Amino acid sequence: MSLLIQSIVNGLNQGAVYALVALGYTMVYGIIRMINFAHGDFIMVGSYTLFYTVPLMVLAGMPAWMAVILAIIVCIGVGIAVEQIAYKPVRGAGSMTALITALAMSLLLENLALVLFGANPKSVPAIFNLPMIEFLGAKIQSKYLITLAIGVIMMLALQVFIKKTRIGKAMRAVPQDKQAATLSGIKVDRIITLTFAIGSGLAGVAALMYCSTYPRATTEMGTMLGLKAFIAAVLGGIGIIPGAMIGGLIVGLLEIFIKVYIAPGWYEAITYMILIVVLLVKPTGLLGKNIGEKV
């Protein structure tokens, strides 16, 4: 029983990280129908920012978690720069061009980090120092529960923002009909930039959650994390905010249970098989709907 409880908590913690990254994918795809494969590397940027700023906060006598604010700001800056420099010029060139550009930006960010920070992993200092909780014989780290709570809060906040605010309604209008949105007074370019800023800010929060569980930063960390979050987004229904959360939690739980109970060496291969199965059986994901288009 203790092992089961521990596995569930670990799976939910890992799934919450995937879910938050998947929310970034969903935000961008939901507005401009683009898969931003460089999104995982924004988390790498946030992790390196935490590596350098957490000790500075401690030296200044401030709480270590204050470094997260700087990580979010840096991620937002990088996200806006990538959108303006790389994505905006090719916005009308077709989905394949945008996809290739996103992959190129991912490689650029990884190699730039390799030049700036070196190939050796960086050990990120502890951000939270919280006691262990014992429940039915299982020892649970409090920071795992905080990670899950942050993921749920961010999902709910995004859902309310998109559904209830004026800017959120503009974000929903843009993918429906850009020309009509422009005629109604919506500044499409500004909405797209704001979408990238929000998605990139989520990457900064995801960096906090990831480094709390795996306290190290590497130049290639964004690739694997981004791929698994993409699988989570597709599983839940890419473009749907609750779907990103559900997909992330499912992928996290599956990984942990496969690793603990079935085949430790196969958990990543099975995770990628999930993507193939979903695309074959229900390409729109768990919460997605098939919408017919007139030819």
Image (cartoon, rainbow, N blue to C red):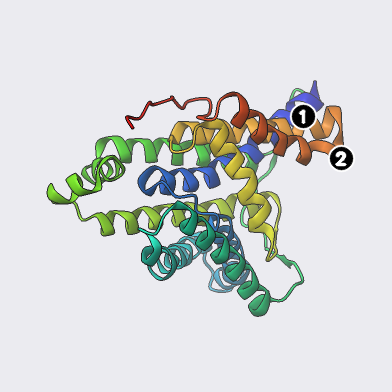
Question: On the picture, is 237 further left or further right than 94?
Answer: right
The residue lying furthest to the top in this view is 1
Residue 266 at x, y percent in the picture: 83, 37
Quarter of the picture holding the N terminus = top right
Quarter of the image where one finds residue 51: bottom right
Under mark 1, the amino acid is Phe
Mark 2 = which residue? 265
| Position of residue 150 in the picture relative to residue 33 (left or right) | right
* Residue closer to the observer: 79 or 180: 180
Q: Position of residue 249 (x, y in %)?
A: 60, 33
What is the number of callouts on the image? 2
Asked which secondary structure carries label 1, the reply is: helix
Q: Quadrant of the C terminus?
A: top left
Closer to viewer: mark 1 or mark 2:
2
Read off the residue under disc 1: 257
Q: Residue at x 40, y 63 (%)?
A: 90
> Is residue 140 left or right of 179 when viewed as pictured?
right
Image coordinates of residue 240 in percent, x first then y, are 43, 34
Q: Is residue 179 above or below residue 267?
A: below
Residue neighbourhood size for the residue with mark 1, other residues' Cα within 10 Å, grouped as few (<14), some (14–19), many (≥20): some
Looking at the picture, which amino acid does disc 2 mark? Gly
What percent of the width, then of the height, locates residue 57?
Answer: 55, 69
Tell me the SS state at disc 2.
Answer: helix
Q: Residue furthest bottom?
A: 115
Residue at left offset 33%, top offset 36%: 160
CA gap, disc 1 and disc 2: 12 Å
Which quadrant would residue 196 be assigned to in this image? bottom left
Using the image, determine if residue 1 lies above or below residue 25.
Answer: above
How dense is the environment of label 2, judged by Cα within 10 Å: few (below 14), some, or many (20 and up)? few
